[in-house]
Amino acid sequence: MTSGASTPEREALPWEVWALLAGSFLVAVGFGIVAPALPVFARSFGVGVTAAAAVVSALPVLRLLFAPVSGRLVARVGERATYLAGLLVVAASTGACALATSYVQLLVFRGLGGIGSTMFTVSAFSLIFRLAPEGRRGQVSGLFTGSFLLGGISGPALGGALVAVDLRAPFVVYAVALVVATAVVGGLLARSTGVGVRAPDPGVEPLTIARALRRPTYRAALASGLATGWAVQGVRVALVPLFVAVALGREPVWAGVALTVFAVGDGAMLLATSGLSDRRGRRPVVVAGLAMVAAGTACLGVLPDLVVLLVASLVAGAGAGLLQPAQGAAVADLVGSRRSGGPALSGFQMASDVGAIIGPLAAGALAQYAGFTAAFGVSGAVALAAMLVWLATTEPDVRTGAPSSTA
């Protein structure tokens, strides 16, 4: 290598990474497209609000149950095959939803999509970090998170327009788009020699969940993943609309404004701090993000005011944008680029899914019987507890060998 060779910080990202980012964006757009249609479609079969909400929960529940299997699939057949199969499973599930003639069929078909969802999520996560240049995993993690965020913001507008045409149209459009994406991304990845089945490395043991749990950083990542699922992915979506209507007495449009403000804070922080954890270390960035999420969440119940809601949403969104890429990169550091980490990655995803499932249920019960102050306060405390776990973690930074307690 000549002296003029690029450093890891200046090296261009492999084209395979960009192909996977494009695929992630399309998947997120699709989730956004069907989001406005799903509960309305369920209600068209004559069921109540609770049953309609159960359809929304069916996919994350199946994601959680199938996550351990997806991790083993990645280790056995490789990331590419698992990724493409996962896309096709979601395509088939979504297409079947469009053909559903009863509530039970819709519930089953939507739930089966969770199997494909965890397959492509774990495999994409594993592959994208294996291909990322050393010293740029934090940046790649931010791009990966950002692709989902941008897709999630873009999808609902298109989905709302399609619902006006036909309730089944969003499902048809998403299914067709996934088939096209599978063909295009699959064709691109087939040209690469770096994304096939990983040859066993006799010098490196696979990172199973049992081995990963021996590492303080992995245990801390599970704690922050649970907090992220609870406060960011679960309670924010499930409780803010109710808080706006019941506690603030405002029109539903303000709930949409608050969620949009959160997304703006998330996206702006992702752009402003791209690669920050590559330069400063994972731990201080995760701790700062968790502190912002805890403060932005807990303030909602303490000061029930519209301005406070918007400011707190912005703070919590910025915290999520700071937190998520760094914690993902921390897990990727433990896996490295020489071994399979599918089981450990699936365990990390499961922690987030558990939070996203339990968080809304627990916070909803607290809001009903103890008030919104308790609901948001406990949710903020979950993020604070995860922050304390990270603060207690002194394992050396995998990237530099320096103690993770230093910036």
Image (spheres, grey):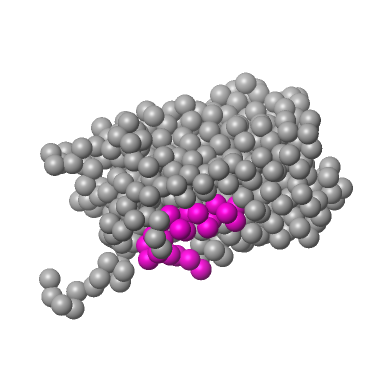
List x then y, in percent, for residue 398: 30, 53
Q: Is residue 283 magenta?
A: yes
Q: Nearer the viewer, residue 33 or 232?
A: 232
Where on the picture, by quarter, is residue 399?
bottom left
The residue at 56%/65% (across/down) is 268
Q: Count the marks: how many?
A: 0
Chief secondary structure of the magenta span? helix
The residue at 37%/66% (across/down) is 279
Res. 276 in view: yes
Q: Residue furthest bottom?
A: 4
Q: Nearer the viewer, residue 135 or 218?
A: 218
The residue at 79%/52% (across/down) is 303
Q: Is residue 7 magenta?
A: no
In the image, residue 11 sits, relative to residue 68, either above or below, namely below
List x then y, in percent, for residue 362: 66, 32
Q: Is residue 97 left or right of residue 217?
A: right
The N terminus is located in which quarter?
bottom left
Q: Is residue 140 left or right of residue 224?
A: left
Q: Which residues are magenta?
A: 272-293
List x then y, in percent, for residue 336: 27, 49
The residue at 53%/58% (across/down) is 288
Where on the picture, by quarter, is residue 404?
bottom left
Res. 84 in view: no
List x then y, in percent, for residue 96: 54, 30
Q: Nearer the viewer, residue 323 or 137?
A: 323
